[in-house]
Amino acid sequence: MRAASPRIAVCFFGITRSLRFTFPTIRDNVLTPARAAGEARIFAHFFEQDTIENPRTGEYVTVDPKEYLLLAPDELRLEPSECCLEQWDFGRLANYADVWNDGHKTTRNLVHQLHSLHCVTAMASDWNPDLYVFVRPDLRYHDSLAPILSRAWNGPDETAWIPLWLSCGGHNDRFAVIRGGRVARKYGMRASRALDYCAGVNGPVHAERLLAFALEGERVRRIATRATRIRANGVEWWESFSFTGIENLHARLERTSTPSILKRVGHRGLRAVQQVAELPFPR
């Protein structure tokens, strides 16, 4: 029998980067709704870092290494940077290509993010939560997660709720709400699939497409919840929240009953609706 309210693991990962700018929206739109929805516990894995230097994003900033205290995590793990690269066979990953032509710095950053996500997923899984909320600390969250938490708790088991915008040929990897440990581990521990993905496409690791690869065959729901990247210097990165094609069809499905849509779009539309609403999501 389902409990009256869920155990919710809120999982932060990566580097705090711009938490001093983003924390008010994290507090209001992530933490407060989670605590209102059930028993919430905050898990965090961060890299120990007091400077950020990223030529691609124009960040050359000194940051507070204890900025994570704003989150008041229930469980925290700090780790030196660079120590995880060998664990995920970075040398083999780097052999596929240097897409950004920056000496594999961007690929290195992605591996760090995936490692941190892997670690915080393992931490949270030990608590056996009902819902997992994976959130980056360097995002300004424009919308409350309260409606999504409610839909996830009252929806089907083993389901990932992922933003519909900026999918880049895969799934948006900025944040997610997930019901069920199996899908949460596939989402959070996808670093272990990175080399399989590269071998399968005979190309470099790609963040959004790796996520779609890791969740292949699982139930995914798209959500319109928005968040914007905030760089360490406080600059707000422009984001496009627009969507087209099959994503637009899914948004209509969220607002309208399935039969009314099918009357308008016919058999071709039926196939598209099934692909989005029932999944597995087509790669």
Image (cartoon, helix red, strand yellow):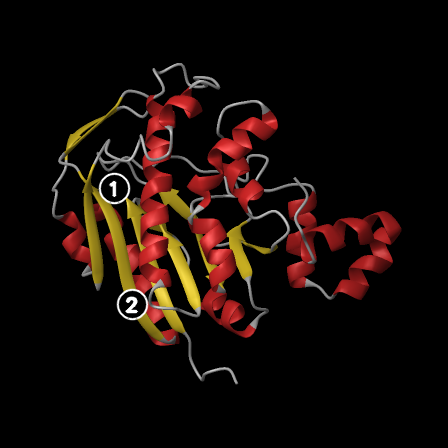
Amino acid type at mark 1: Ile
The structure residue drawn at horizontal position 60% and vertical position 42%, both measured from the top left corner, is: 243
Residue 200 to residue 275: above or below: above
Question: Viewer-proximal residue, 46 or 50?
Answer: 46
Question: Viewer-proximal residue, 45 or 260?
Answer: 45
Query: Which labelled disc corresponds to residue 15?
Result: 1
User: Horizontal placement of 22 versus 51: left or right?
Assistant: right
Query: Which labelled disc corresponds to residue 122?
Result: none
Count of marks overlaid on the render: 2
Q: Earlier in the sequence, mark 1 or mark 2?
A: 1
User: Horizontal placement of 157 versus 189: left or right?
Assistant: right
Query: Which labelled disc corresponds to residue 41?
Result: 2
**SS at mark 1 in the image:** loop
Spatial distance from mark 1 to mark 2, Cα to Cα? Answer: 19 Å
**Quadrant hosting residue 212:** top right
**Quadrant hosting residue 36:** bottom left
**SS at mark 2 in the image:** strand
